[in-house]
Amino acid sequence: MFQTPIRKELYAIEIFNGMNVQRVHTSLLKHLLALKEGEPSKQFGLEYGSRILSIFELETCKTQTIKRLFEDERFAFAKEYFLFKTLDELKENVFEGWELFDGEKIKLF
């Protein structure tokens, strides 16, 4: 959890090695189901949603995962909850340049 100037922000962090996009998709689907139930927020006593930070060893795996989530209707409502970077991108800037699965770039908070 981060304390921002506005409020506390809750993030789950997933780090993915290799090229197994199916494994990544399955993992992020579990996060999606938890978000739908509000579980992360309830657990920490927050009245707003948390986010999932997905960090990838390989750009190719990140790109393929983003494409797959964009095409998966179950994720349609959850665009702003899933943020993506490669490890190299993270080393350059932790707070800016996070990618949503529609390609939009945003700040962490």
Image: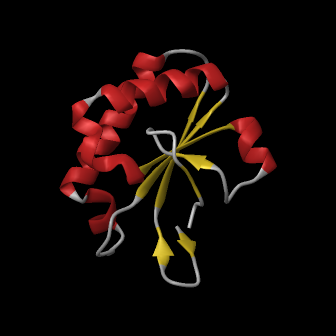
Residue 88 location, quadrant: top right
Image coords of residue 43 (percent x, y)? 31, 65
Image coords of residue 63 (percent x, y)? 55, 25
Rendered view: 87 above or below 90: above
Instruction: Determine the residue positioned at 50% across, 15% down.
Output: 20
Q: Residue furthest right?
A: 92
Instruction: Determine the residue positioned at 73% across, 41% down.
Output: 89
Instruction: Determine the residue positioned at 37% across, 31% down.
Output: 69
Q: Residue furthest bottom?
A: 5
Rendered view: 3 above or below 50: below
Q: Is residue 26 left or right of residue 104?
A: left
Image coords of residue 99 (percent x, y)? 55, 44
Colouring: secondary structure
Q: Residue furthest left?
A: 37
Q: Nearer the viewer, residue 103 or 43?
A: 103
Residue 16 location, quadrant: top right
Q: Is residue 108 left or right of residue 52?
A: right
Image coords of residue 33 (percent x, y)? 24, 43
Rendered view: 69 above or below 95: above
Q: Nearer the viewer, residue 91 or 64?
A: 64
- Say which quadrant the C terminus sits in: bottom right
Q: How many marks?
A: 0
Instruction: Determine the residue positioned at 28% across, 28% down.
Output: 72
Rendered view: 2 above or below 84: below
Q: Is residue 28 left or right of residue 103?
A: left
Q: Nearer the viewer, residue 75 or 56?
A: 75
